[in-house]
Image: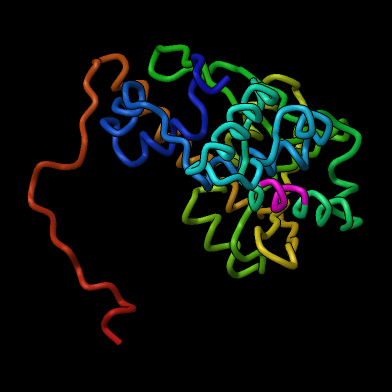
Amino acid sequence: YHGGEGVSKSVLDLIHRSPAHYRASLVLPKRETAALTLGTAIHAAVLEPESFEVNFVAAPDVDRRTSAGRAAWTKFQLDTAGKKILTREQYDTALHVRDAVYGNRMAANLLCGGTPEQSVYWTEPIDGQEVLCKCRPDYLRRDNIIVDLKTTEDARLDQFLRSVTSYRYHVQCAWYLRGIEDVTGDTHDFMFLAVEKEPPYGIGIFTLPEDFIDAGAYSAMADLRVYARCKASDHWPCYPEEVQVLDMPRWFKG
């Protein structure tokens, strides 16, 4: 899914920054950061607990500066070949988040009666082109509710709202709703399940009002039109070349 054809929300985000950034992402090696690794582990632990146990393992506490430590590490790698190695802290965090989610009655109820990580593809007609698009809902319930799991530093309403605007979660919401309705013919509701990555692993459950989703849909289609134009012309510009004026923001004026 991630390396295949189709415009995803992450592609829209890169296009939104600049087409050149999207183009560069196609040739640059993907960097595996600690945050990305932890996010992947948490999603597996919460959405597919059985696969987490099979595919992830915690690294042993060995001193690889010593001969015994290096030998133990080599044996560990052989014994766990094919599995994703996490630090002990990452592994434990994933399990703590899983337990917090399933220990919360409403959160646990959201993650039942459906299918996790189901890829969805559709086409959008843009300026005479048929653009292949895609999304992968974290959890698609049979009663037409999309559940999106978000790890966050702060799951309070006002703080998560900042995450929505910073990371364009409203665009994701609109994008998923559009694609899934195109494929299924049914309208859906969209719920964010936000869980903190530190004790006590607080949980917030959120939905967006219609005008917020409409704003996300507008941004998504604007980005998609830029993508289609750039693909048709094979021209992927970066930032404006002219001099830009930096106006003083209102909050800075005091």
Indicate whether 202 appears above or below 46: below
Q: Where is residue 212 in the image (x, y as percent from the top left)?
A: 58, 53
Position of residue 9 in the picture relative to residue 51 (left or right): left
Based on the picture, tell me whether residue 206 belongs to the magenta stretch. Answer: no
Residue 29 shown left or right of residue 1 in the figure: left
> What stretch of residues is rendered in magenta?
91-95
Residue 143 is left or right of residue 30, and the answer is: right
- Coordinates of residue 222 in the picture (x, y in percent): 40, 35
Q: Which residue lies furthest to the left in this view?
A: 243
Residue at 60% across / 70% down in the picture?
Answer: 158
Of 231 and 197, which appears nearest the observer? Answer: 197
Q: Is residue 93 above or below residue 190?
A: below
Q: In which quarter of the image is residue 87?
A: top right
User: In the rendering, at what x and y percent does residue 160 appear?
Assistant: 60, 62
Residue at point 26%, 83% (across, down): 253
Quadrant of residue 180 within the rendered picture: top right
Q: How many numbered marks, from 0 up?
A: 0
Q: Position of residue 141 (x, y in %)?
A: 83, 34
For the view shown, which residue lies furthest in the front direction? 67
For the C terminus, the quadrant is bottom left
Q: Residue at x 42, y 34 (%)?
A: 31
Q: Which residue is drawn at 66% across and 67% down?
A: 157
Specify the color scheme: rainbow
> In the rendered image, which quarter contains the N terminus?
top right
Q: Is most of the magenta stretch helix, strand or loop?
A: helix
Q: Nearer the viewer, residue 42 or 104?
A: 42
